[in-house]
Each structure stands twice: as C-alpha cells, then as structure tokens.
Image (tube, grey):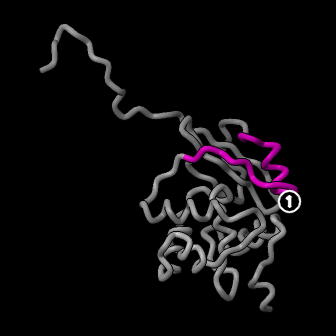
C-alpha cells in the first residue's frame, strides 16, 4: 500500500523526446535524418528540401561518404521492428562497405536458410537507409529491390564502389 504522505519517485509516463530533422544535399536528392535523444528513427531520401530543425549529425562524415571517400558515420539508432526484422537488420549492418551479399546469404547468416524472401521483406521495412545498409544486399541474379527505388540503390552502390548487377546483365 502506498503511503500518501511519502512521494515516491516514478518514471514519467509517456515521456517523449523532441524529434529533430536534418538534411544534406546529395547528387541524387536530399538525404534526411529524423532523430531524438535516443537515436536516429528514420533516414531516407527525398526530392524536395525538407524542413530542417537541426544541423546534420556528423555532417562532414556524410559529405565524405556521399563523395565516395569513406564509410557512413555510425550513429545510435532508435528503431522498432519485430525480432525477425531486427535480426535481419543486424546482419545487414555486418556487411562491409562496398561489399555485397545475396538475400539468401543473409538468410543463412541469421540461421534461416529458406527465408530469402522474408529477408527481402524485412529489408523493405528498414527505416534507416544507409545506416542499415540494405543497398548492399542483392538478388541472386541481379540488383534486387529497394524501398527507395532502384536508382537510389544503384547510386549508393556506386558511391561505395560496388558493382550494380542489373547493369551487368544489359
């Protein structure tokens, strides 16, 4: 039973952090980050300049990355997903800069060798493009899908000096 004369410390219910938005111009459009005190919640590309509320974290590192001269910065993430999605996203983060794996290889890496299509679906739900480098995952016989579109996937792969399998088939 609570003692009405004693104030007990409790965590704030529904505590929210202020969401910030940053963006930088790239050769293919605006790259935006949405983040709060807990980490990056969304990273995506857009054609129009978004409303910017804060400077881009690690801005110089982003310019270096998009110029093809280095890896993207490692930022803290604040994302939600199923345990399967999180396993796929963690495995995708282990794929090195400029490297490629197939959806099937990623499925095997998480111990589910028959789940290549489900891996593709989980990557399609990736809320933080580039930070979880799903552009490094390709189909067995080609480029494969990408939630932001094939043009951006090719751009990111070229930025990292990786091949673009769909172009090689033409």
SS at mark 1 in the image: loop
- The residues colored magenta run 56-77
Q: Is residue 139 magenta?
A: no
Depicted 50 relative to depicted 53: above or below: below
Percent across and percent down for residue 14 are 37, 34
Give the main secondary structure, helix, strand or loop, of the magenta stretch. Answer: loop
Depicted 12 relative to depicted 4: above or below: below
- The residue indicated by pointer 1 is 68
Front-most of residues 15 and 106: 106
Q: Is residue 76 magenta?
A: yes
The residue sitting at 68% across, 36% down in the picture is: 54
The residue sitting at 56% across, 68% down in the picture is: 123
The residue sitting at 16% across, 13% down in the picture is: 3
Q: Is residue 154 left or right of residue 16?
A: right
Percent across and percent down for residue 46 are 68, 58
Q: Residue furthest top?
A: 5
């Amino acid at each position: 039973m609570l003692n009405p004369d004693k104030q007990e410390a409790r965590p704030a219910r529904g505590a929210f952090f202020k969401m910030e938005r940053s963006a930088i111009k790239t050769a293919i459009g605006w790259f935006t980050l949405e983040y709060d005190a807990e980490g990056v919640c969304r990273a995506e590309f857009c054609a129009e300049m978004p409303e910017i509320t804060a400077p881009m974290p690690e801005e110089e590192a982003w310019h270096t990355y998009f110029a093809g001269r280095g890896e993207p910065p490692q930022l803290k993430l604040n994302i939600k997903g199923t345990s399967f999605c999180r396993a796929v996203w963690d495995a995708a983060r282990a794929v090195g800069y400029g490297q490629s794996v197939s959806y099937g290889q990623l499925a095997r890496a998480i111990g589910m060798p028959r789940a290549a299509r489900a891996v593709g679906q989980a990557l399609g739900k990736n809320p933080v493009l580039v930070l979880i480098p799903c552009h490094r995952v390709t189909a067995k016989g080609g480029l494969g899908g990408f939630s932001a579109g094939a043009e951006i996937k090719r751009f990111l792969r070229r930025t990292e000096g990786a091949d673009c399998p769909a172009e090689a088939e033409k």
